[in-house]
């Protein structure tokens, strides 16, 4: 896979040279090119931004350097394959594991890292007439620029490429992986020692009973997902749930109902805030 990144902070992308990605580059699985946007400016100040039309705070990235950069980078690449332009932006569609899998199947990605209030909207509009353009957000928060988001997306995509991770199986159990554990968070994991200062690894994992281990892991995945991401439980396809899955989820729902009933009981027994004296006299036990 070929990856080009255009940015005003090329040093920000240094992590693409280390760890698994660095090794994948050395082995030729990945061909990464980082470009400084300012190389395509024409003025002495190497200006990349200007004030927004219509007023408002911040600055907008000028279209000309971006268009020159995208044209040059596209023409410098292989002419046998088409690039896909990725624009990381908080205004984009949410990037998911499904997108990571889809992008991992593409031969060439160009990342355009915006800063300030973003790129002049005519850049993606004009690019769309030539190549696929994907505006992607990595979550519901705002970063100062697209560089950190590019690192996130590149890591999520490239670890799926054959020959990038050491163990091809280690992606199949991932939280959000498509397959048996689809739509569930991964449960807890353990390694040796079996007894660490009295904290013991669950016996089933040491049993060698592989069907029982798989079942235990699925129970744990369901529990963790219900606790941390109830939205994912709501989105599960009932056809993907077996009898034991339903039992685990029913137990969790029952526990929720008990907690709710307890809270309602507390509400009934405790006078409302407004009925109470806002300045009660100090109680004897706490006064000096
Ligand atoms: Cl892709 N870019 C920026 N600047 N902020 C973000 C983001 C991207 N995704 C979430 N927040």
Image: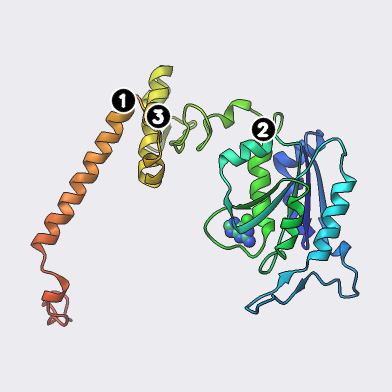
Q: Earlier in the sequence, mark 2 or mark 3?
A: 2
Question: Does dot 2 land on a helix, a strand or a loop?
Answer: loop
| Disc 1 crowd, CA 10 A, few/some/many (<14, 14-19, 20+) | few
Q: Is 244 on the left or on the right of 9, as rendered?
A: left
Q: Is 38 on the left or on the right of 95, as rendered?
A: right
**Residue designated by label 2:** 165
Q: Nearer the viewer, mark 1 or mark 2?
A: 1
Q: Residue at x 24, y 45 (%)?
A: 256
Q: Nearer the viewer, mark 1 or mark 3?
A: 1
Split into 4 quadrants, where in the image is the C terminus? bottom left
Q: Position of residue 220 (x, y in %)?
A: 38, 34
State whether residue 122 is above or below residue 162: below
Q: Residue 11 versus residue 207: which sits nearer the camera?
A: 11
Q: Are marks 1 and 3 in contact (CB under 8 Å)?
A: yes
Q: Quote the CA–CA distance across marks 2 and 3.
A: 24 Å
| Disc 3 crowd, CA 10 A, few/some/many (<14, 14-19, 20+) | many
**Residue designated by label 3:** 218
Q: Residue 135 versus residue 264: which sits nearer the camera?
A: 135
Q: Residue at x 79, y 39 (%)?
A: 25
Q: Residue at x 52, y 57 (%)?
A: 140
Question: Does dot 3 land on a helix, a strand or a loop?
Answer: helix
- The reply to whether residue 11 is in sight is yes
Split into 4 quadrants, where in the image is the N terminus? top right
Residue 244 is marked as 1
Q: Position of residue 253 (x, y in %)?
A: 25, 40
Ligand 1 quadrant?
bottom right
Residue furthest to the front: 129
Disc 3, ligand 1: is the CB inside 8 Å?
A: no
Q: Earlier in the sequence, mark 1 or mark 2?
A: 2
């Amino acid at each position: 896979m070929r990856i080009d990144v255009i940015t005003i902070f090329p040093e920000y992308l240094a992590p693409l040279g280390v760890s698994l990605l660095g090794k994948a580059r050395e082995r030729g699985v990945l061909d990464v090119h980082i470009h400084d946007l300012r190389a395509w400016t024409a003025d002495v100040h190497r200006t990349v931004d200007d004030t927004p039309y219509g007023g408002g705070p911040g600055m907008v990235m000028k279209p000309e350097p971006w268009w020159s950069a995208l044209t040059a980078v596209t023409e410098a690449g292989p002419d046998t394959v088409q690039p896909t332009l990725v624009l990381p932006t908080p205004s984009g569609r949410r990037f998911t594991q499904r997108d990571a899998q889809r992008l991992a199947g593409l031969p060439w990605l160009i990342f355009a890292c915006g800063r300030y209030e973003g790129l002049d909207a005519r850049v993606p509009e004009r690019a769309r007439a030539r190549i696929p353009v994907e505006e992607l957000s990595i979550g519901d928060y705002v970063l100062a620029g697209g560089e950190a988001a590019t690192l996130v997306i590149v890591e999520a995509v490239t670890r799926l490429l054959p020959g990038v991770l050491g163990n091809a199986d280690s992606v199949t159990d991932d939280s959000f992986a498509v397959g048996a554990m689809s739509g569930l968070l991964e449960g807890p994991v353990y390694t040796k020692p079996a007894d660490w200062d009295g904290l013991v690894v669950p016996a089933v994992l040491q049993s060698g009973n592989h069907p029982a281990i798989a079942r235990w892991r699925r129970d744990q995945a369901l529990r963790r997902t219900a606790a941390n991401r109830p939205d994912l439980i709501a989105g599960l396809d009932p056809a993907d749930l077996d009898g034991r899955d339903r039992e685990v989820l029913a137990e969790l729902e029952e526990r929720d109902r008990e907690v709710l009933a307890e809270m309602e009981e507390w509400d009934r027994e405790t006078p409302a805030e407004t009925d109470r004296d806002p300045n009660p006299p100090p109680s004897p036990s706490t006064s000096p």
